[in-house]
Amino acid sequence: MTGVGLAEELLLLGYDDKSGKATGSRIGLDLGMAAAVLVDLALAGRVAFSDGSIVATDATPTGDPVADAVLARIAADTPHTPASWVQRLRHGLRDKILGGLCERGVVSDVDETELGYIHIHRYPVLDPSVEAEIRGRLADALTGERVPDERTAALAAVMAAIRVQPNLGLSGPAAEDAEKRLAEIARGAGFTDGGGLEESTIRPSVALVIAALSRAISTALGSRA
């Protein structure tokens, strides 16, 4: 694994570039990032969904500190369900992801802590090229006829699971079409809601992980409003 992880991509999309604040549901984003780390490990051939649990299939480190810490936990622990893992992993994950992005100069940590105990931090973007690349891939997938690559399809599937509205500078019919396309990509990526093997843009082993995590997130978030 190299470059920006799926959890980092999801976080960048979930924060306002200028204000450096989260723009949507905090728990939704935290669950999504936990799932994204697991999906990244599945993409790297390190974990799989088997007998109702997420299990390690290869404990070899990937080179990503956050993902490797999660992989080590999974390899050392007894099997747990996808629902259990996303809940176990989401606590403290946001700070780790933000810390990594700060170290790499992608975002800045603006400390606005007051009175020594009211901790307020913002994370405005320093290097817009990283998020621009992510949004470009999504825009191609959501508004064009190009079939998304495996990684972009996986990102779209996680976004759909946490009920993120595509924020690509679109409005009106274009925004509505993008939202529908997000759901279509998710179905194809996760074998859910009628999706099938012959239609999938993602390897079966990865798609099974995405489908299981999507169900777990849906249960955690409850019914749609």
Image (cartoon, helix red, strand yellow):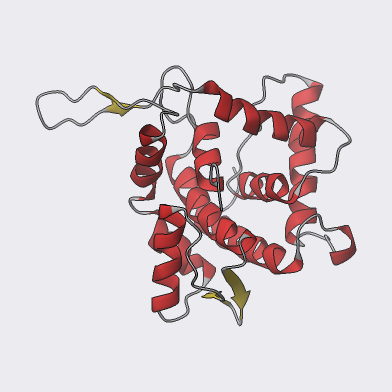
Query: At x 61% / y 79%, what residue is drawn?
Result: 50
The residue lying furthest to the left in this view is 115
User: Looking at the picture, how far across and down is residue 34, in whole percent?
Assistant: 48, 54
Query: At x 41% / y 22%, what residue is drawn?
Result: 124
Query: At x 74% / y 30%, what residue is drawn?
Result: 139
95 vs 152, left or right, is: left
Give the vertical position of 221 relative to 45 (above or below).
above
Asked where in the image residue 123 lies, by quadrant, the reply is top left
Front position in the image: 49 or 137: 137
Give the vertical position of 42 relative to 109 (above or below).
below
Front position in the image: 128 or 192: 128
52 vs 202, left or right, is: left
Asked where in the image residue 113 lies, by quadrant, the reply is top left
Front position in the image: 146 or 45: 45
26 vs 213, left or right, is: left
124 vs 190, left or right, is: left
User: Looking at the picture, how far across and down is residue 159, in whole percent?
Assistant: 62, 44
Query: At x 75% / y 55%, what residue is drawn?
Result: 189
Front position in the image: 92 or 179: 92
User: Looking at the picture, how far across and down is residue 180, in whole percent?
Assistant: 78, 38
Give the vertical position of 127 relative to 31 (above or below).
above
* Count of numbered circles on the image: 0
Quarter containing the C terminus: top right
Give the vertical position of 121 relative to 192 (above or below).
above
